[in-house]
Amino acid sequence: MELPIMRDTISINTPFLDTTVDHPVDCDIVLPDYCPDVSRVLRTESCAEIDAKQIDGARLTVSGTLYIHVLYITENSCSIRCLTHETAFSHTFDLKEECTTDAYAYVSARVIRANCRLIGPRRVQVRGSIVLHARVFCEMNESFVSDIDDERLEINHHSIQCSTPVAFVEKPFQVHEQLEINYGKPAASSIIKSDATVFVQDFKLISNKVIIKADLKLKTLYSSEAEEEDSGIEVVEHNLPISQIVDISGVDEECGCILNLHSGNVKASISQNSEGENRQLDVQLDVMATANVYRTREITVVTDAFSPKFETMIQTSPVHMQYVSDTVHKTEVLQESLELENAELKTVIDCTTEAYVKESKFENGVLAMAGDLYISGYALNSQGGPVSFDKTVPFSMKEPVEGAPNHWHANPEIRI
């Protein structure tokens, strides 16, 4: 018999890829003529940025740039200099099947190892590994039965909340600032390195746009003009408010958004100010804004049907829907103690910490997170010479989330 079946359609993101691979790095670097000879390699730092992604059928091709910073001690002195090198990389991922609909890829790159070997006073060899985490989603429409208007059937309805995709947008923008080294610190002779971290402070969705307000924290390590005092290593920090408008078609005030800002490699140079002192920092960096916009609505589905008069056969199929319950932003203080073996330190110059979440799960209304803290820095030893240190320590955090069942899933991200 013919039944008056009513159907509804929703858009869902179907995962086509979720994998992590190690991409090896091996390169020889020759010092340019303007760099002094290397006496000892102090430390090697590196970061990787994704420049382009392309989905072609059943393949995802990723290309990017690896930035290598070799910090070394010059000959016949305790001065620190930085050798900077850029090298391109690419990797191809095979998808489980060909994407025939709208698809987007989210790829992150992290350098987990970069070892430097000194071959000669003007040549070094760097070997390492880049961890690439790639996720590919295809937007598909799923049809389901929302109601059956027939008195001969007993219908079981179920109302659920679901978050349907609206848009996924990645927009890079450049930050270019001229900053001053205050007169409480000595003037600079050369830049050793600069790092930046971006924190989202607020954002607002309006018609076809998202307005972003954020803070950029910049830390610069430099050699001062008075290098005879404690090797002349200084640290200066700047806080910069930034704002950006990202165009996103189809967005309005009723949408939700998961927004992230990621800072890229920092290029910094020193120049003279109006008084002829080397106190002006010229800073350039790229920031990537990633906006995952969704719309939450309630839908009604028919989960079962029965007729007391006629034989009834029900066919069902699973449909995986997502529901974004909340986005939580918290500030926590985490304290750890380090024990450095075979190190007699006079003073710590700089310390940097990165956090990587390895596991997260909900337990009795609490989001439990565990991972590693990667702590690195520079110090002066008891003889006044520069040394570096690094250590990895485990950490754990717990954040109460009211009403969260154990089967919920979270994607925590930690910025320090």
Image (tube, grey):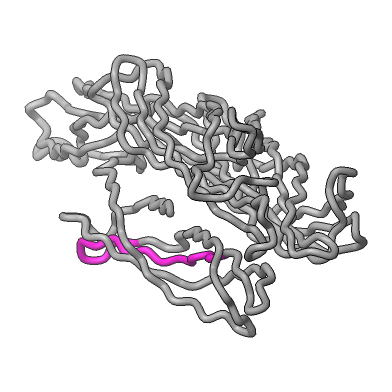
Can you name the residue that lies furthest to the left here? 151
- Residue 53 x/y as whole percent: 63, 32
Vertical arrangement, residue 176 with respect to residue 187, above or below: above
Residue 305 located left or right of residue 50: left
Quarter holding the C terminus?
Answer: bottom left
The quarter of the displayed image where residue 327 is located: top left
Type of secondary structure dominating the magenta stretch: strand
Q: Quadrant of residue 206?
A: top left
**Magenta-drawn stretch contains 100:** no
Looking at the rendering, the stretch of residues picked out in magenta corresponds to: 361-376
Q: Residue at x 65, y 38 (%)?
A: 270
- Residue 370 locus on image (x, y percent): 41, 66
311 to the left or right of 378? left
Residue 364 falls inside the magenta stretch? yes
Q: Is residue 126 visible?
A: yes
Q: If the image is split into quadrants, where does the N terminus sit?
A: top left
Front-most of residues 76 and 178 = 76
Residue at x 87%, y 49% (from the top left corner): 31
Taking depth in this image into account, of 351 and 410 the one nearest to the observer is 351
Q: Vertically, is 375 above or below 171?
A: below
Question: Whole-percent x and y of residue 359?
Answer: 43, 63
Residue sitting at the far bottom: 342
Q: Is residue 214 left or right of residue 189?
A: left
- Viewer-proximal residue among 358 and 329: 329
Residue at image x 9%, y 40%?
A: 308
Task: Give the mark count.
Answer: 0
Q: Nearer the viewer, residue 82 or 133?
A: 82
